[in-house]
Amino acid sequence: MTSPDDAPQPEPRPAPRPRLVFTDPFEQQTSDDTDRGWGDASGERGLDWYRSQRPPHHGEK
């Protein structure tokens, strides 16, 4: 008669290898794609901001 301690023990399984997951990097928005990433505290820009950003070659109107 054999005791349960004499029974062969199964070999431990190796840890599963991490899988490579390929995703489209363009699906994720980066911080510099936002107004906050460019240093703007609020997400809204008023008409005054757009007028101040007008290039000089567009003239004053």
Image: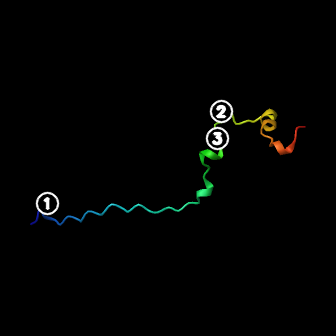
Q: Residue furthest front?
A: 57
**Quarter of the figure that contains the C terminus:** top right
Q: Callout 1: 10 Å neighbours few (<14), some, many (20+)?
A: few
Q: Callout 2: 10 Å neighbours few (<14), some, many (20+)?
A: few
Tag 3: residue type? Trp
* Labels 3 and 2 touching (C-beta < 8 A): no
- Residue 15 vertical position relative to residue 60 in the rendered view, above or below: below
Name the residue at 11% across, 62% down: 3
Count of marks, rendered view: 3
Q: Callout 3: 10 Å neighbours few (<14), some, many (20+)?
A: few
Name the residue at 38% across, 63% down: 17
Q: Is residue 39 left or right of residue 8?
A: right
* Labels 2 and 1 touching (C-beta < 8 A): no
Q: Secondary structure at mark 3?
A: helix
Q: Can you tell which of label 3 and label 2 is closer to the viewer?
A: 3
**Quarter of the figure that contains the N terminus:** bottom left
| Residue 36 vs residue 18, the one in the foreground | 36
Judging by the rendered image, the residue that carries numbered circle 2 is 41
Tag 1: residue type? Asp
Judging by the rendered image, the residue that carries numbered circle 1 is 5
Judging by the rendered image, the residue that carries numbered circle 3 is 38
Tag 2: residue type? Ala
List x then y, in percent, for residue 37.
62, 41
| Residue 42 vs residue 15, the one in the foreground | 42
Place residue 32 in its image quadrant: top right
Q: Is residue 31 left or right of residue 44?
A: left
Place residue 47 in its image quadrant: top right
List x then y, in percent, for residue 54.
81, 41
Q: Secondary structure at mark 2?
A: loop
Q: Can you tell which of label 2 and label 1 is closer to the viewer?
A: 2
